[in-house]
Amino acid sequence: MASFQSLPGFRDFYPEDFFRRQHIFRVWRQSATAFGFQEYDAPVLEPLELYTTKSGDEIEGQLFSFKDKGDREVSLRPEMTPTVCRMVGSRAGALKRPIKWFSIAEFYRYERAQKGRLRAFNQFNADIFGEAGPEAEIELIALLIQCLSGFGLAKDDFLIRLSDRDLWFFYLEALGFNDSQARGVLGAIDRYEKMGDGAFKAYTDVHGPLEDSRKQKILGFLQIKGLADLEAALAPFGSEKLAARLADWRRVLEGLAAMGLAEFVSVDLAVVRGLAYYTGFVFEAFDRKGDLRALAGGGRYNDLVKKLGGPDLPAVGFAIGDVTTGLLLEQRGLMPAFAAAPDVYVVIGGPAERRAALADIQALRAAGVRVEYPFKDSAFGKQFKAAAESGARLALIYGGDELARGAVKLRNLADRSERELPIAEVRAAVRASLVGP
RNA sequence: GCGACCAUAGCUCAGUUGGUUAGAGCACAAGAUUGUGGAUCUUGGGGUCGCGGGUUCGAAUCCCGUUGGUCGCCCCA
């Protein structure tokens, strides 16, 4: 047992773990690139204030924060949103709209680890700045779907639940709740799926009892699972603002339907997201079959750039994590097996043959061919075993007999066929064999 | 911050009422095997039994503490 271990909630990535992580990153990056998002990165360590300004002082309990040697209050980043708001905000005047950015980065939260949640984890973040209309939501939800279906996950595997904090506030206002009460109700709604009726305890503690008729209306609104139901529920409260909002809803759902993605998305007002800074549409991605925590979440946050000192810039974004995604892919058998096979394994007869082999090995590698060879001289039998175990498609054999003729052997390890070729043709022959059938 | 369960080799685990030098399979390495394959056989390396203390003639085993893991609660950006 080693004397040192990684810190709680932090992971070592051994090659097979790293391979799985890279697979996840690769799908995310390909998806974002295909959607025209540009990649950025930012510091791991930020001023503590960046997060307390956004989320309040209570957040500090969940942060990896400390004082640096210059007596600055700093924190490892727990999320990307404030950082990207700062970056976009400070150059907003010069950036072409819409601003579509993504990042893949590691984040740190000082919390107890549990299933799907660690202290250090990776997230893909995608955000669109400068577009107030629902086209931004369409783009991001479509990207989120691609970031999951790119692994081979289908509509039976996951679901995007779409909700709207604006509509909730509108509805609660119509029921006579003031702003503070409405926020309390949203807090209860956020917990209702998990806790049932107990979710309202925090509300009644602060705002007093909630009469049954209004509570039933709230619970009824919560059950809405489609646009038609939504429109029917809101019909009694007709107003221009509401009509415009419902028009936004139709545009989002029609846009996604036109992309062929309707079956991935459901209207579901039970999703409100805990954070207060969301200002409109909010959405989460869920595993349909299992009991995993949310796969991804996001929404619109039109006030945050300004709150963090930037211009008034509408924004919408989402994040998806590597831990839950990895668990889901393992459960569904969609995580590819670790593969580190070279293209070519070179079998070397002995010290004299090694010199010729090394020259070709270096030339092949410089040309981009993955080449492996034994460091120490050993029996041919052992080397062929090693060649087979390496998973290489080809073996190049540098034996004394062949080299005496100025030749080497090229063996196809899959079908065990073998041919001799002049040593000068090794590079061309290897290339042809690798691209060939 | 709170709670439950767990901890023996790189991995999965065995280890009797507390009793000599803690074992197996897999993995790794060497050999059988100096010109052709993932097999087989033989051999080997690898352990402060998570750590610390206590009980005992004697602790992997019993007790206390602690650290870590897993899973919940709180929280979830």
Image (cartoon, grey):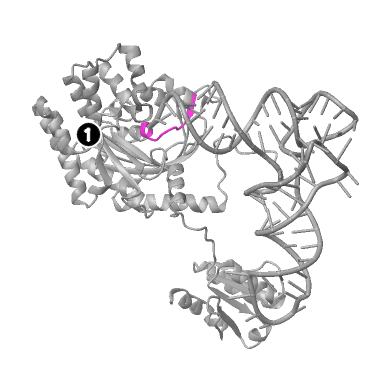
Rendering coords of residue A125 (x, y %): 36, 41
Quarter the C terminus of chain A occupies: bottom left
Dot 1 falls on which chain? A
Q: What segment is highlighted magenta in the picture?
A: A73-83
Q: Is residue A13 magenta?
A: no
Image side of residue A327 versus residue A274, left or right: right
- The answer to which of A364 and A137 lies nearer the viewer is A137
- In the picture shown, does residue B28 fall above or below A428? above
Quadrant that contains the N terminus of chain A: top right
Res A128 seen here: no
Residue at the bottom extreme of this rendering: A405
Q: Name the amino acid, label 1.
A: Ile
Residue A333 lies, with reference to residue A74, above or below; the image says below
- Residue drawn at the location 48% of the way across and 49% of the way down: A21
x and y percentages locating residue A375 in the rendered image: 68, 66
Q: Give SS at disc 1.
A: loop
> Would residue A361 be found to the left or right of residue B40 on screen?
left
Given residues A359 and A387, the one toward you in this image is A387
Query: Residue A358: x percent and y percent?
Result: 62, 72
Horizontal side of residue A28 vs B51, given as left or right: left
**Figure quadrant of residue A388:** bottom right
Residue A112 visible to an observer of this rendering: yes
* Viewer-closest of A250 and A53: A250
Circle 1 residues within 10 Å: few <14, some 14–19, many ≥20:
some
Q: Which residue is mark 1?
A: A224
Q: Is residue B37 above or below residue A216?
A: below
Whether the magenta-drawn stretch holds residue A79 is answered as yes
For residue A249, side relative to residue A366 (left or right): left
Observer-nearest residue: A23 or A232? A232
Q: How many marks?
A: 1
Q: Is residue A332 above or below residue A415?
A: above
Q: Position of residue A325 (x, y in %)?
A: 42, 45
